[in-house]
Image (spheres, rainbow, N blue to C red):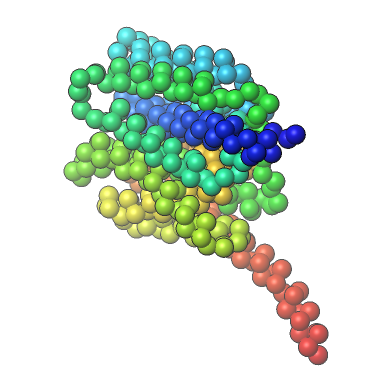
Amino acid sequence: MPEELHQLQSGLPLNRSMAGSLTQSLAMWTVLFMGWVWLGEQGQRLGWPMAGGLLAVALWWAVRLLIIGSRWGAMLSGRAIALMGGTTTAGALVIELGAAGQYAHTLLLTLAMTWAVWSGALEAGRRIGPVSHASSVWHVGPAIVAAALVWPTLAAPVGWLSREWRVAGLLMGLVLLGAIARPARSHFTLGHTPVSSLSMSVGNALPAMAMGLMMGSLWLGSIWCTAQGWSQPTVVGLHLMTMALVPAMVQPALSRWRTSAPSLNSLVLVLLVLAAVLMQTSNKPVQGLVGMTGIALAWAIQVARHPSPAGAANGLVRHSLSMGGPVLLIAVGQASITLGPQALAWAYGLLGALALIALAYRVRQMGLRSAPQATSSWRNAI
């Protein structure tokens, strides 16, 4: 009897599978959020002015994409993943305690690669069965909990437990959580989405690139925001909220609307274009927040269609195009040394221009497909 049918008939194994999926998603999202925020923060502290302090998070992003797109990442054993997580925890604690001395930035770059293997392996493997085809609420629900765990760990004032031990405690908890949630290797499948055209691949890769650029430049942008009166905990909280809450709001709407895939693809591109225009025409934090929300909304639609943080990276061509995100992030960091906030605005402008080109190409293709049908209908009428 197939495993999926057996789970549906037995009830208890299905509940266990759902619980395992939720636990796996919680570990995956929390490791992901911690990677974006903690590595970006430490890169600013230890790596400035090398690539604007964004080298560590860009390296983590690039290696993580490679792991997600590889069969090796999906088949990595639970023991190896736990080892990567434990090494990451130890390295983070050493850096937080200031015990690395002059080698702190070198350790951070090494840690970024280890963290990327850990994070990418958690994302690469996905369960087969009813849970994998269920509503993406199974993924955005844990995302909200993950954001609620990460924000006080990194941004809350010092309380009864110092920050370095909060960071180490959360990471070690994620190691144990990932080990508990990970099923046998036979329960994993490597995600793959067929790619029909280069234009569609570019369009599908852009939301993940824009969202990664937003999260990767969090601490770089916080410098400009705090200069205008915004506190760093507020900036961190807003970034995490947009990445976690927007998909939770999008999913119910998409489940009610019977919208075709081409229409959703076009909507994603329109949102990216509008966000880029908004960020190009204003440098005020409020307008920037609205633009960020547009980017998060475009990315959230991709997440709802592909229920995984790595949804837009599936597919060989699309995955390769997504590697442009880390490269663009490094370019922004380097340019920000002289251009300041304008470097990030120009990067969003570039992504918006690519989205506009992809949108125009799709509209043209739709026109070409509809033209023969219109001609056929006219001839039949004669």
Measuring 20% from the left and 20% from the top, which residue is drawn there?
160
Image quarter of residue 124: top right
Using the rendered view, name the quadrant where residue 80 is placed: top right
Within the image, what quadrant is residue 105 found in? Answer: top left
Query: At which x and y percent is residue 290?
Result: 34, 54
For residue 163, side relative to residue 4 (left or right): left
Give coordinates of residue 168: x percent, y percent. 36, 18
Position of residue 141 in the picture relative to residue 3 (left or right): left
| Residue at point 20%, 23% (across, down) | 158
Camera sees residue 37: yes
Front in this rendered view, residue 5 or 376: 5
Residue 295: x %, y % from top left:
43, 50
Image coords of residue 218 (percent x, y): 35, 37
Question: Can residue 220 be seen in this snapshot?
Answer: no
- The residue that appears at 35% across and 43% down in the rendered structure is 241
Of 313 and 256, nearer the camera is 256
